[in-house]
Image (cartoon, grey):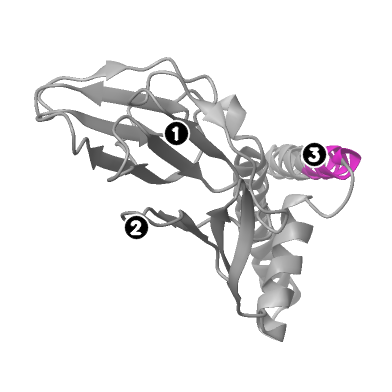
Amino acid sequence: MRNGHARTLHRVAGVLGALGLLVLTVTGVALLHPEWFDRGAKPASVVVADPFVPGRLLRASPFLVEESSDDGASWRDLPCGLAPATPVALRCDPADSGVVWLLGTTELLCADDGGIVWAPRGLPAAVGFDEPARDLALPPGGAPLLTTDHHAWRWIDDAWREQWHAPPSRSDSWRRWIRRLHTGHWGSPLIARLHDGAAVILLVVLVSGLVLLRRRNGNGRRP
């Protein structure tokens, strides 16, 4: 391969690699900051029918809880400033009229008036970014059951009691650590800011490098 061909190949590969890295960096920063985007028109994540009021439905989507009294033909927002970013379960207590539970990956809310006024409920200490909540069961006449990937607890005597525990494997621990490292959730809040700073520096390097390459190629074509 001639030197000219090698330089051209190197330049093209460098540009393609820089563009790909630019996209990865921008989208990575955007994933770290979902608060930069409004809610938009997102479908409901979870829906439940009120077992005590015919035709009444509740649904939850990111940061929003809604109510319908006509089997879903129309909806109205419910005042819930604590609505979770990622709802995973919405349950009406089958044995207690008006009691509704709303579970997010790291939040748990409860209302005793059909979902009008919500109050936060504490979660087990193990539930968090590394081990998000997955589901909530309300057996008739039994204690609520909360599950994650590796744990389950029951709400007994105003406290969460561990029901079972399946320890994570070594590969699970590695995936959890890689996720924490990639998203900046492995230390104090300052670590996330350092990730933002590194991303900004990388973006400056990539964009300025592409600009300089374009100018250089443009100068090379001039007589």
Q: State whether residue 40 appears in this view.
A: no
- Name the side, left or right, on which 35 lies relative to 64: right
Q: Which region of the structure is painted magenta?
A: 189-202
Q: State whether residue 93 appears in this view.
A: yes
Mark 3 and mark 1: span between their CA atoms?
Answer: 24 Å
* Mark 1: amino acid: Pro
Q: Residue placed at 32% from the left, 27% from the top?
A: 41
Q: The residue tagged with tag 3: helix, strand or loop?
A: helix
18 or 118: nearer the viewer:
118
Q: Which quadrant does the N terminus fall into?
A: bottom right
Tell which tag, 2 or 3, sits nearer the viewer: 2
Magenta: main secondary structure equals helix
- Give the label on residue 196, or none: 3
Residue 48, image x, y percentages: 25, 41
Q: Which residue is mark 2?
A: 139
Q: Quadrant of residue 74?
A: top left
- Name the side, left or right, on which 160 lies relative to 194: left
Q: Which residue is mark 1?
A: 62
**Which of the marked residues, 3 or 1, is nearer the chain's N terminus?**
1
* Mark 2: amino acid: Pro
Q: The residue tagged with tag 1: helix, strand or loop?
A: loop
Residue 101, image x, y percentages: 42, 39
Residue 132, image x, y percentages: 59, 56
- Name the side, left or right, on which 177 lies relative to 41: right
Crowd rating for badge 3 (residues with CA inside 10 Å; few <14, some 14–19, many 20+): some
* Mark 3: amino acid: Asp
Determine if the magenta segment contains residue 190: yes
Q: Quadrant of residue 176?
A: bottom right
Mark 2 and mark 1: span between their CA atoms?
Answer: 26 Å
66 or 14: nearer the viewer:
66
Q: Quadrant of residue 193?
A: top right
Q: Residue placed at 71% from the left, 79% from the top?
A: 2
